[in-house]
Amino acid sequence: MTSERTRIAHLEARPLDVPLLAPFGIATGRIDHVHNVAVRVTLAGGAAGWGEVPWLPPVTAHDPPAILTAVAEIAPRLVGRDAAGWRARSAELAAWLPSAPEIRAGIEMALIDALTRAWDVPLFHFFGGASNAVTTDITIPLGSAAEAARLAAGYAARGFTTIKTKVGGVPGGGFAADRERLLAIRDAHPGCAFVLDANEGYTADEALALVHTLGDAGIVPALFEQPVTRDDWAGLARVTREAGVPVAADESCRSPADALRIARDGLAHVINIKLAKSGVVGALEIAAIARACGLGLMIGGMVETRIGMDFAAHVAAGLGGFDFIDLDTALLLAADPVIGGAASDGPTFTLDAAIAGHGGALAWD
């Protein structure tokens, strides 16, 4: 029986446009402005929750008009259902939107946020309550060595100890340009830990050459993320076997089935969970598979505001056991449209046990 207090009364979406402090370049493209979509679920008891659907071409498939249309079409199907049955609602969304995990994720976020606010439960407690804080890395996108050094020095002053840097996408630069940029970062921030993210930008040979070249320069990455294209399973396995550093699957792991394959065949040491790749429930299932199979866990995002990033922080803090936290994209924005939410001090996000849901909201009306 549906509880009136947790019955879904409204589902709606609006554009969420925010400028970036600087262009964000990865191996597969570049963005200068965030054009995401905010989702709000309102329950009959009055509680409202917020989610976010990212648009990061070519990583995600649906642009804002398509996202807004999809949410409008789904809304009549969800209205009247009980948010307390959030796993059943997730299964329904998977059936209705099988090829749109990022849209499903945004709706799931808003639905679970509304539910936990109705129940007066902090989101990290809802997911297990392992911790109430996470410490993130900070990303330096593709660009010149001089710009990377400037950013690294600034991040060192702000207390960031892990630098994630994009590699594999400097036109004509090869891994020589990546090496130059990494050396510049190390000089500006001695002792920092490195996470390298190729975003599918290398072949296995190139990825291994980069690791060996960096090793000759005294740089040993703490993690090498998605060195090869998503479907190059043999290449991913080879880098995992031969690189001598931990390797993470990101684009290669978009579903629980992918996680099972990676674990079964020894294709990576770590799985990077992103809610927009698999939906919230799918992400929980991937985390369970990784833990059961002895794989490390990472959590990241797709250039989202604090709506998406705070929700992911609650997932990571609540579940616990994440080896790598990459929830920095809201720190790369030129404006913050979110009211409330997690408190940040440099790289550390603290989640308030006195605030229900993820605590963040948007000026909607």
Image (cartoon, rainbow, N blue to C red):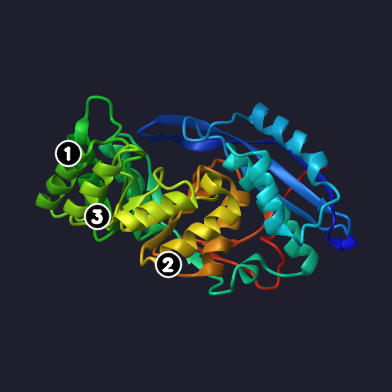
SS at badge 1:
helix
First of labels 3, 2 by sequence position? 3
Q: Could you classify mark 3 by the number of other residues whose Cα lies within 10 Å: few (under 14), some (14-19), or many (20 or more)? A: many
Assign the N terminus to one quadrant of the image. Answer: bottom right
**How far apart are labels 3 and 2 at the CA level?**
23 Å
Q: Position of residue 349 (x, y in %)?
A: 53, 63
Q: Which residue is mark 3?
A: 221
Q: Residue at x 38, y 35 (%)?
A: 26
- Name the amino acid, label 1: Asp
**How far apart are labels 3 and 1 at the CA level?**
17 Å
Q: Which residue is mark 2?
A: 291
Q: Position of residue 20 (x, y in %)?
A: 52, 37
Q: Residue at x 59, y 50 (%)?
A: 308
Q: Residue at x 72, y 37 (%)?
A: 71
- Name the amino acid, label 3: Pro
Classify residue 118 as left or right of residue 4. Answer: left
Can residue 189 be seen here? The reply is: yes
How many circles with numbers are drawn on the protein?
3
Q: Identify the disc placed on residue 205.
A: 1
Classify residue 233 as left or right of residue 291. Answer: left
- Name the amino acid, label 2: Arg
